Image: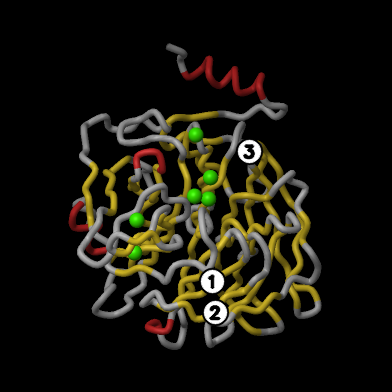
Amino acid sequence: MMNNTYKIILSCLALSACKVEKIIHQNPQDKPVIALVADAETEPVTSFDDAADDPCVWVNPTDVSKSTIIGTNKKEGLEVYNLEGKRLYSYKIGRVNNVDIRNEFLLNGEKVSVVTASNRTNNSISILTVKPTGELEEVAAKTITSNLKEVYGLGMYKSPKTDKLYVFMVSKKGNVEQWELFESNAKIDAKLVREFSLGSQGEGIVADDVHAKVYIGEEDKALWKYDAEPDAENNRVKVISTKDLNMKDDFEGVTLYDSGNGKGYLILSSQGNNSYAIFDRITNQYLGSFSLKDGGAIDGTNDTDGIDATSVNFGSQYPKGFFIAQDGANTQNKDSLHQNFKLVDWQKISKSLNLD
Ligand code: CA
Ligand code: CA
Ligand code: CA
Ligand code: CA
Ligand code: CA
Ligand code: CA
């Protein structure tokens, strides 16, 4: 059994830049995986096989009931759904794998919501804004070409220190890039500001805009936490390993549920055992896991890639927001359909896992 000091030395030897690695000691107490039933599902994506991947939520600032879900169809582009799951728009912008969104970016003197996606068709970052109707519009000043061999995971970060907007991307080799977005002639341009390595294939990324951290899943190894500022050291904290209780590789989507005042939950798709693990946002202590089983009208999920969560009050159906997950095998009765995304009322999750 290696002690921590020895592990730190090893990581210094293995990587060009010496970095410190800490481990969160999780409570080993047995916590059962609680099976829940989804409340809604989106229409199937337009492509067959493994096509749906990663969702994010645009909260409509003038009418939350007209908010949208933006999902990747990694064979051809972005799809936009309403909260009932009906597809409103689709954009064949290329083989986009992951997608994320941030609000209040100043463009042309107006605050806009910015959507970015890792686009494997031309190995770039697609950059779009959301119109008041929920339609998307490409606004990249040029093709933002990555130095990664193949762009894969993506997550956005808005700095609480500078208000600058960033995009993190990770490749199948585990190399990470951090890009800064900036306005250029009423379009959005980007520049590479930081690079580091996870060690092996990563995908799921979520940044915490309050605590200035970024969580990145190394699919076969662990969920890591890094400092998110572009000038930060590449020291990292291991939140949980794929070998820990209730965890099974691959680690895929990762997201945050924002309870306000810097509190909330970190959620991870533990794809290998078809479950979602929940951690305290501040301490990163493991709180429990849930899965989505078949219900009367809506089937459960398995092999989930991307996930997202919102704490916005959407009215009686989702007063505390919802969790959304990609489903690897979407069915209806006995029929097999194209993949889709499932929505769950957050209250169902918080009650069954005794979250406050
Ligand atoms: Ca998949
Ligand atoms: Ca993956
Ligand atoms: Ca694996
Ligand atoms: Ca994926
Ligand atoms: Ca299913
Ligand atoms: Ca279904």
What residue is drawn where x is 51% and y is 42%? 217
Label 2 Cα crowd, 10 Å radius (few <14 / some 14-19 / many 20+):
some
Q: Which residue is mark 1?
A: 79
Asked if the residue under mark 2 is in contact with the one under mark 3, i.e. CB atoms within 8 Å, the reply is no
Asked if the residue under mark 1 is in contact with the one under mark 2, i.e. CB atoms within 8 Å, the reply is yes
Looking at the picture, how far across and down is residue 214, in whole percent? 53, 49
Does residue 48 lie above or below 198 as drawn?
Answer: below
Q: Amino acid at mark 2?
A: Tyr
Task: Classify residue 113 as left or right of residue 322.
Answer: right
Which numbered disc, 3 or 2, marks the residue closer to the eye?
A: 2
Q: Amino acid at mark 1?
A: Glu
Q: Secondary structure at mark 2?
A: strand
Colour mode of the rendering = secondary structure
Does residue 59 lie above or below 124 as drawn?
Answer: below
Counting residues from the N terminus, which is met first, the one under dot 3 or under dot 2? Answer: 2
As drawn, the label of residue 119 is none
Gap between marks 3 and 1 measured at Cα? 27 Å
Task: Classify residue 213 as left or right of residue 38.
Answer: right
Residue 135 visible in this rendered orientation of the protein: yes
Does residue 203 lie above or below 141 as drawn?
Answer: above
Gap between marks 3 and 2 measured at Cα? 33 Å
Q: Which residue is mark 2?
A: 89
Task: Classify residue 29 as left or right of residue 167.
Answer: left
Q: Amino acid at mark 3?
A: Gly
As drawn, the label of residue 174 is 3
Residue with the most extreme top position: 1
What residue is drawn where x is 54% and y is 87%? 132
Residue 259 visible in this rendered orientation of the protein: no
